Amino acid sequence: MSGLDFSQVLVLFVILIASLTFHEAAHAWTANHLGDPTARLLGRLSLNPVVHVDMIGTIVFPLVAIMTGIPLLGWAKPVPVDMRQLRQPRRDFAIIAAAGPISNVLLAAAGVMVFRAVAPEPTSPAGELVTSAIIRFILLNVLLAVFNMIPVPPLDGGNVLMGVLPESLAAGVDKLRPWGFVLLYALMLSGMLSTIMHPIQRAVLEWLL
């Protein structure tokens, strides 16, 4: 089970679900704030995990990955955005995309504050579990923020990139969308994804700490 016992798997899975829920709710809140109520009207402006969970992408794939170490990419239900409702469609869509990763950085920052304020000394099984959970919460949210900002559609970073590039270049990036997961797996299996992400994760953690 990739070195994790049942309690650790359960804690990590709960943290993942909570973090993805907050991430998707941040997209929905930002879209609503910028003029598109679509997600709100569909019940997606919510911290209820049920409305954001995709059975395969949010539950099956992450659990298999956590328990076995097999590299599987997970996902939650994407928040629908009607760009016609946005005041400045390209700019606002990029802001909506960025809101998810930003929300994970905010969660990681909150985790750091909690750790500094209340984390018990890991001198007992309960203390070790709490300390480990807080650390995993921080690390996972930094991981989600950095991963989602990789500039490959359909990740948030790809959508942000399309919002800041000239329209002709943005159209070229959008053509990569059907191949996005193939590109991500190629980066992951080649080791390039870790090479790209680890320095950024380390920089974000040092900044938060």
Image (cartoon, rainbow, N blue to C red):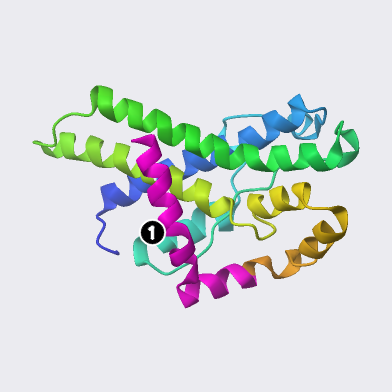
21 is higher (above) or lower (below) than 66: above
The answer to whether residue 14 of the structure is visible from this angle is no
State the residue at coordinates (88%, 33%). 85
Residue at the left extreme? 123
Q: Quadrant of the C terminus?
A: top left
State the residue at coordinates (82%, 27%). 35
* Magenta segment includes 169: no
46 is higher (above) or lower (below) than 184: above
Residue 30 percent coordinates (x, y)? 70, 30
Q: Is residue 126 left or right of residue 15?
A: left
Q: Amino acid at mark 1?
A: Ile
Q: Is residue 51 left or right of residue 187?
A: right
| Residue at image mark 1 | 66
* Badge 1 density bin: few <14, some 14–19, many ≥20, Cα 10 Å: many
* Magenta segment includes 198: yes
Residue 172 percent coordinates (x, y)? 81, 65
Q: Which residues are magenta?
A: 182-209
Closer-to-camera residue (23/147):
147
Q: Quadrant of the N terminus?
A: bottom left
129 is higher (above) or lower (below) than 113: below
Closer-to-camera residue (10/144):
144
Chief secondary structure of the magenta portion = helix
Question: Image quarter for residue 153?
Answer: bottom right
Residue at the front extreme? 166
